[in-house]
Amino acid sequence: MHLPSLLLAAGSASVVLSQPLTRLSQRSSKLQFVGINESGPEFGEANIPGTYGTDYTWPDLSTISTFVNKGMNTFRVNFLMERLVPNEMTGSLDAAYLGNLTETVNGITKLGAYAIIVPHNYGRYNGEIITSTEDFAAFWKTVAAEYKDNDKVIFDTNNEFHDESSTLVAQLNQAAITAIRSAGATSQYITIEGNAYTGAWTWTTTQGTDGKTNGETMGSLTDTVEDKLIYQMHQYLDSVRIPLPPLPITRS
Ligand SMILES: *[C@@H]1O[C@H](CO)[C@@H](O)[C@H](O)[C@H]1NC(C)=O
Ligand SMILES: *[C@@H]1O[C@H](CO)[C@@H](O)[C@H](O)[C@H]1NC(C)=O
């Protein structure tokens, strides 16, 4: 499912929807965040760490400036935890992968746009469900410390937790929020994701392995910083069949 997706942001009443570029400037005057998902650094996950240029790549900053010029202001940069902290979640950062991540982040934020950094890990590390809130907190404290002075960075706790305990997912999100703030990153937005692929249409209905839904577990998250916590939900157009206007037919 790699179709255009909606990012629903509670608290700031924002909806991001891929649309024809001509309508973007109109849209971005009404929405706080408008942007796209940048794939590449998380590719080739069968090869860890893998080779840059063969297994994975980094976004091309010139294409990002094209989108900024069209009115987009938010770029979601996917990466893999196993490449950024190779040995264990509590371990240190890989200098080259971090260097490329920071180069990408700085390239985006220098254009005045937000860079959402997201471990594209589905709540797993080395193939195992992350169960230690302490280790997850240590990972986020290490990463957030790198970007604590850049207020255009948005921390996304993890891409699409699924098939695990919803209670655990909420605890991991809370551990990440607390760790990010404790690293001194207090000016940035944090966006959390729920269980069941953080699906908007299943938020209150799909149960985790503990029998609970996101609706029952995710509402209790707290942040010491006011109005900087964004609930992220994914909604694919083929799942809800949003009626779209008919395409104009051109005859020549
Ligand atoms: C972002 O891109 C990755 C890689 O193509 C994809 O797996 C993921 O579903 C995308 N995320 C969203 C929210 O569209
Ligand atoms: C990006 O990664 C490559 C390959 O690992 C490395 O040679 C290069 O130094 C990295 N770039 C930065 C800015 O760290």
Image (cartoon, rainbow, N blue to C red):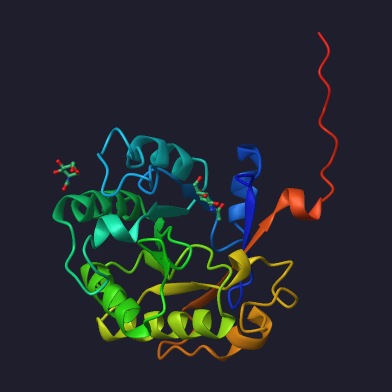
**Looking at the image, which is closer to me, 26 or 149?**
149
Residue 244: quarter of image:
top right
Q: Position of residue 96 (x, y in %)?
A: 16, 50
Q: Residue at x 37, y 81 (%)?
A: 132
Q: Residue at x 75, y 48 (%)?
A: 238
Give the image quarter of residue 206: bottom right
Rendered view: 209 above or below 2? below
Q: Is residue 4 left or right of residue 65?
A: right
Q: Is residue 16 above or below residue 164?
A: above
Quadrant of the frame with the C terminus: top right
> Horizontal and vertical percent for residue 249?
84, 22
- In the displayed structure, would residue 94 be above or below residue 245? below
Which picture quadrant has residue 19? top right
Percent position of residue 148, x then y = 26, 73
Q: From where the camera sits, is residue 186 visible?
A: no
Image coordinates for residue 113, horizontal then vertical, percent: 40, 55
